[in-house]
Amino acid sequence: MEELIKLNPGLNIRALDRKSFREYGKIITGYGFAGLIDWMARETPIPEEGNIYKSSVPELEQFDVMENLKKGFYGEMPVQIGYCNGRNSTLNGLEYHIGSEINIAVTDLILMLGKLQDVEDGQYDAENVDIFFIPEGAAVQLYETTLHFAPCKTTADGFKCIVVLPRGTNEPLENDKAVYGDRFLFARNKWLLAHPERKALMEKNAWPGITGNNTKINC
């Protein structure tokens, strides 16, 4: 983390602790994520470029922690366990869901987080983003009002992150989003504000709702 701070003098990269993180979520303990982390470390690749996201991975969902999360954390709601691996280093977008998300860091990674309450007239100023260093092995709950997106890498090797969500989240919508008249709606249980510089999202008709610089992490 110290090296990242030196390489990013204009950014306030914060350590993960309960006090600093409480506006966005909670640190999760007691569920036994070691098996998931070991499997991810052995079996999943980091792409040469960009990110890869899989919303539901049967091998991860076979671990006992799947049922424990369903009952003890999500109150018997159906859930999915997937992952996001990649080499991302920029903000690009911010999304939110109905229901909390859990991120489990298989490697060190960075999360850029914001508050839904700071969205005004369909716009969010990237200057309001808080940046957290999430160490390998840590698990965090992101509240449903916490704006977030794909993690960022802390080294040139990339990152690996396990993602737990209510089942069906991030799957394609059954109808064109225009039917709902919601400019942020992007996929099932996924509302997204994109940075206009992120052409891949603009080409998918994402709402250009982030103003300011497309924050980048140097590593």
Image (cartoon, rainbow, N blue to C red):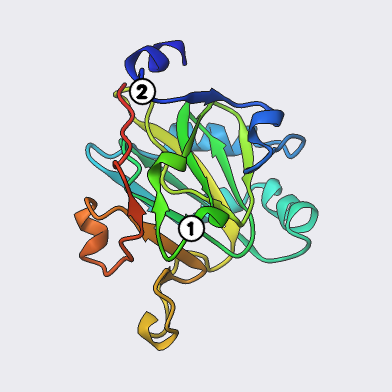
- Is 86 placed above or below 115 here? above
Of the image marks 2 and 1, the number of the one nearer the N terminus: 2
* Distance Cα–Cα, label 2 vs label 1: 23 Å
The secondary structure type at the circle numbered 1 is loop
Q: Residue at x 33, y 16 (%)?
A: 7
Q: Quadrant of residue 121?
A: bottom left
- Is 56 placed above or below 157 here? below
Residue 198 visible in the snapshot: yes
Q: Residues within 10 Å of mark 2 (few under 14, many from 20)?
A: few
The image position of residue 70, as x and y in percent, is 72, 58
For the C terminus, the quadrant is top left
The secondary structure type at the circle numbered 2 is loop
**Residue highlighted by disc 1:** 119
**Number of callouts:** 2
* Amino acid on which the number 2 mark rests in the picture: Gly
The image position of residue 57, as x and y in percent, is 49, 54
The image position of residue 124, as x and y in percent, is 42, 53
In the figure, is residue 62 to the left or right of 45?
right
